[in-house]
Amino acid sequence: MAAPVPDDDSRGIVPPVGPFGSISMAYVNSGPEASRQGPGEGPLSPWAARFGREEKSIPYSATTIRHSALAPEYPRLDPRYYGDNPNLQEHFAGFERGMDEDRLHWSEKYQNHSMHMYTWQVGPLNRYLSFSPRFPKVLGGHATNENIIDPPVADAIRRLTGAQNVASDEAGFGVFELERIKVDESQWLSFFQRDRWWDLEVEDPEPGVRWSVDDPKVWAELSICLELANRMMKAMVNDKHDWLRTILWGRLDYWRNVHPDPPDAYTRVLLSQNVDRFVCQQLGLQCFFDFADMEDWEARLEELLIGLKWSFMDNADTRIMGLTEGRKIIQLEINHLKYLIEGKATLAEKCIIIFFETVAILHELTHAIGMSRLQTEGPRLNNYINYKDDPDPGLEPLVDFDGMAELGHACEKAIFGGAVEQLPIMRLSISLWAGTWPWRRTAPYPKDLRNPAFSEDYQIRLWRIPALWTSKLLSESFWNDATVPRKSDNGFHLTRIFTSATPNAPPLPRDWGNVIVDRSVIPNLSDVEREMVMDWDERHALWDMFRQSWYQESQGRWKFTPVSEWGTRVDFLFLNILSGSFADISPS
């Protein structure tokens, strides 16, 4: 069990009297270090160094160390080995200063807002991976206790990888190379092939890396993402997935032609087979799906994407995973691939990143397919959009009268049950979730705000995506399992274990619902999934025990201070930094 790494060295300040002194917003230290460095120029804390730091999160301290609001406080966790439980033999003895109390509560408020959970909850989700019956439980690189691996499995890991410590990276990545999906380009659909890729020329390339599929370092990582995307696409073809049928052949039309009261005169819809049949019955029309030849789905994909090219883009905004220009070219953001190429990711993080990159590939392909249909097809192929004369020819449709027109997210919703996101939005993904889409009233896409998803009482439902599931998706064992013939069912068999519900308060929710375990699914879980739930319960019990005598009181006090609100915190702290003074903001 690894000891927590201190996140700062804040000595020399007289602590407030008792466990809850007044919350003091001192930033400027009186020592020589502070006189040399401004508030944004000090060294990064271990968490900030590993995950990055959003300046607007503002977790200040009395030293010059620049903290990350992702860092768990009271108790602390190591920024890599956060799957280990902390040593809680020492009881809480009070905050050394009011600023420490502020950092705890502000960080957790930021985590709830940006991650919709707390960092200390992530450990159980990323602790275990599972690749096959031979390796049903492997450590993902965030825990140090090798004794939690069953002895027969541990012996197999040592024998087959040569690693003596089964908690080591050598052991984990050794298992990954043995068990992961094997890249077979001969089986790829043509639009994934290497000859469809263009190089990216950048002024300041990474040392030793050329952003080209001809660079072995780039191809070694990218090809696994493309292999997974190809397998998922072919699985949807084989399973006759309703979403793939919809995007390939669904009715493209103006809302006004098929249903009254459109949001806008040129609002478009894309209708699935069932909805198209219903609309045609109401309008007395013959339905395309009743007579069309839809036998060769792969040929249909190849036809729509015949001229598609791929490339890379270097975009500092990691919120954008890819861009699609019409039906011509898709650019994939390189920051996540950089992290894999640099070898800095743990095995759990690698599995998460590969899956998330694959989602981006499927997301952008959907945009390209939709635009290809709009630009090249007419009523013969169920497209009734007058593309040439439309004032906004690139406008995407609402799928089945949904609330927002964004085909990529509609694709994720149809495949996985909800849009897939990484939170917080940084280069290194610490957590993934899928959930309700649409819900953001402020999203920059055409929308129908009358849709129930935008009402105040609508429940935004999220479910965490454990690293455990991403490793299963990356294993040959899953794809070769004859007992699971339909691979794409139920979001590729993603069980919704860790869930939350949050009212869609306008303009956006600020306090997100607590993540809980859906106990109704436990009987259907695998042994390692049940162990993950047990670890989740154990961690919550540990935090409750450590915080039970003081946390609620402390948080209640803090909520009545100016620094607890997004709108007043920045101005308040800025004024106190300029003055270099201690500002007592105790509510009493």
Image: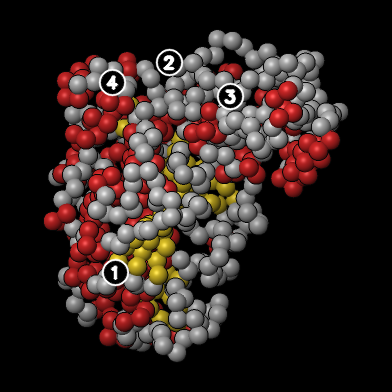
Q: What's the residue at 21%, 43% (across, down)?
A: 181
Distance (Cα) linking label 1 and label 2? 50 Å
Front label number (3 vs 2): 3
- Which mark is drawn over residue 308? 1
Q: Which residue is mark 3?
A: 7
Distance (Cα) linking label 3 and label 2? 18 Å
Q: Which residue is mark 2?
A: 1
Mark 2 is on which residue type?
Met
Upstream in sequence: badge 3 or badge 2: 2
Upstream in sequence: badge 3 or badge 4: 3
Mark 4 near mark 1, Cβ–Cβ under 8 Å?
Answer: no
Dot 4 crowding, Cα within 10 Å, few <14, some 14–19, many 20+:
many
Query: Which one is nearer the viewer's eye here, 422 or 220?
Result: 220
Q: What's the residue at 28%, 17% (across, down)?
A: 165
Mark 4 is on which residue type?
Val
Give the secondary structure at mark 1: loop
Q: Which residue is mark 4?
A: 166
Give the secondary structure at mark 3: loop
Front label number (1 vs 2): 1
Q: In this image, 508 relative to 429: left or right?
A: right
Q: What's the residue at 68%, 13% (across, down)?
A: 93
Give the secondary structure at mark 4: loop
